[in-house]
Amino acid sequence: MTRRAAVAAALASLVGVVGAACGADGGSFPDASTLQLTTIGRTSGALRTVTIWYVYGDRLYVQSGKNGRTDWYRNLLKTPAVTVKIGEREMRGRATPVEDPAEAARVHELFKQKYLSARVMSWFGGGFGTGKVVAIDVQ
């Protein structure tokens, strides 16, 4: 078994059946502005971590700029098992790109409500708060 396959198998076994264990109101998360998202490199198989904005609606959401051409986004397309760290809480999860335009628009509004800079940039046609949306179900 290759190292990449071993890492993927280990993460997949930890993910198991993923549910909305966060609580309906998202209150189990600290009031933080960013999370650390760890993906498995699509070619290297190495763990890759980025710090990005997130929002919580009925689950965690992040968004990729550059029309989905960020490395972390392309990594999770290949291997959707991810690790999320918010504050001191670390969780395993499964990432799913949001394809429904109405759901993506709803999440973009959540970003604009949470982040002033996203809201201001949207007034001037900026891309903040309008990236490729990814839903993360965590356990």
Image: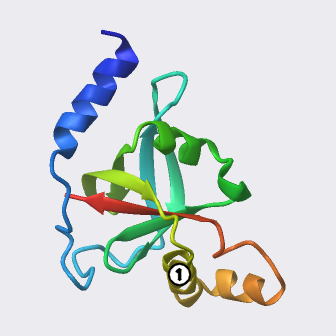
Residue at 20% over, 55% down? 18
| Colour option used | rainbow
In the image, taking residue 65 as reference, residue 80 lies left or right, namely left
Picture coordinates of residue 119, whole percent (x, y): 67, 87
Is disc 1 placed on a helix, strand or loop? helix
Query: Which residue of the protein is positioned furthest toward the right in this rendering?
Result: 124
Query: Which residue of the protein is positioned furthest toward the top in this rendering?
Result: 1
Picture coordinates of residue 60, whole percent (x, y): 37, 68
- Quadrant the N terminus occupies: top left
Q: Can residue 113 be seen here?
A: yes
Please determine whether, in this image, residue 118 is positioned above or below residue 83: below
Residue at 21% over, 45% down? 15
Q: Can residue 88 be seen here?
A: no
Number of other residues with Cα within 10 Å of mark 1, as a class: few under 14, some 14 to 19, many 20 or more: few
- In front of the other: 55 or 103: 103
Residue at 21% over, 71% down? 22
Residue 2 is drawn in which quadrant?
top left
Please determine whether, in this image, residue 29 is positioned above or below residue 95: below
Residue at 26% over, 59% down? 138
Residue 3 is drawn in which quadrant?
top left
Disc 1: which residue: 102
In the image, taking residue 18 as reference, residue 72 lies left or right, namely right
Picture coordinates of residue 68, whole percent (x, y): 65, 53
Give the mark count.
1
Residue 74 is drawn in which quadrant?
top right
Three-letter amino acid code at the position of disc 1: Ala
- Quadrant the C terminus occupies: bottom left
